Each structure stands twice: as structure tokens, then as C-alpha cells.
């Protein structure tokens, strides 16, 4: 596994994956369960920072899209946190 891809997957998942379900079904980087959780948490945190910027009148133009994406991330995290074994579940 390429270390740069692993770093990107964990620290900038939106750049490497199109959706939270792609992280769950990861075939690009072959993330472990814990790495998938960390990538999703990073993505969720990035969305929260963007929401704070919106609230401080710094429009990002992605308000509704971010809400839907954040819900998908929460669902993916629940699946991973409640599962001990690998799985492929679409969101």
C-alpha cells in the first residue's frame, strides 16, 4: 500500500473517495476497519468546520449537500462502530 494514498485516505478522504460508501467498500487503499473509521471522522470534522464557517457568514455554497453527506457519514460510522468484521453495505 502506498503511504501517500493512506495519508490522503485518512486526512483528506473527500479527495480520494466520492462517498462514504466508497470508504466502506474500499478497494483503492485497502483500509482497515479502524482506518475507515478515522477517515470518516476526518470527513465529518471537515464538514463541521465548513458549517462553522457558514454560521460566521463565510458562505461555502454547499450547505444542503453537506447535510446529506454528513448523514451518510454518520450512518457509515454507525455501521463500522457496530461491526467487528469487514462487510460491504451500500448507503
Image (spheres, grey):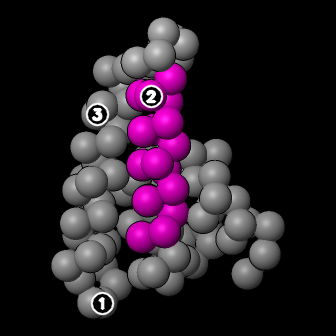
Give percent across and percent down for residue 91: 25, 53
Identify the image quadrant of residue 81.
bottom left
Q: Which of 82 and 19 is in front in this view?
A: 82
Residue in the image at 54% along x and 71% along y: 27
The numbered mark, 1 or 2, whose residue comes first in the sequence reads: 2
**Nearer to us: label 3 or label 1:** 3
Residue in the image at 27% along x and 90% along y: 84
Q: How far apart are marks 1 and 2 (CA)?
A: 35 Å
| Magenta residues, dominant SS class | helix
* Residue corresponding to mark 2: 52
- Note whether residue 16 is visible: no
Inspect the magenta stretch and tell me whether residue 16 lies in it. Answer: no
The numbered mark, 3 or 1, whose residue comes first in the sequence reads: 3
Please, is residue 20 above or below residue 69 in the view?
below
- Residues in magenta, as a range: 37-53
- Mark 3 is surrounded, within 10 Å at the Cα level, by few (under 14), some (14 to 19) or many (20 or more) other residues, namely few
In the picture provided, is 41 more to the left or to the right than 14? left
The numbered mark, 3 or 2, whose residue comes first in the sequence reads: 2
Residue in the image at 40% along x and 53% along y: 20
Please, is residue 17 above or below residue 83 in the view?
above
Q: How far apart are marks 3 and 2 (CA)?
A: 16 Å
* Residue corresponding to mark 3: 68
Q: What element carries label 2?
A: helix
Q: Residue 48 carries which label?
A: none
Identify the image quadrant of residue 70.
top left
Q: Is mark 1 on a helix, strand or loop?
A: loop
Please, is residue 45 above or below residue 37 in the view?
above
* Residue corresponding to mark 1: 85
Inspect the magenta stretch and tell me whether residue 52 lies in it. Answer: yes
Identify the image quadrant of residue 71.
top left
Q: What element carries label 3?
A: helix
Amino acid at each position: 500500500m502506498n503511504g501517500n494514498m493512506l495519508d490522503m485516505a485518512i486526512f483528506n478522504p473527500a479527495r480520494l473517495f466520492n462517498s462514504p460508501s466508497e470508504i466502506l467498500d474500499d478497494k483503492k487503499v485497502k483500509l482497515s476497519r479502524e482506518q475507515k473509521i478515522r477517515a470518516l471522522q476526518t470527513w465529518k470534522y471537515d464538514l463541521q468546520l465548513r458549517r462553522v464557517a457558514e454560521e460566521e457568514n463565510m458562505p461555502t455554497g454547499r450547505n444542503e449537500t453537506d447535510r446529506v453527506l454528513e448523514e451518510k457519514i454518520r450512518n457509515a460510522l454507525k455501521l463500522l462502530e457496530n461491526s467487528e468484521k469487514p462487510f460491504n453495505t451500500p448507503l
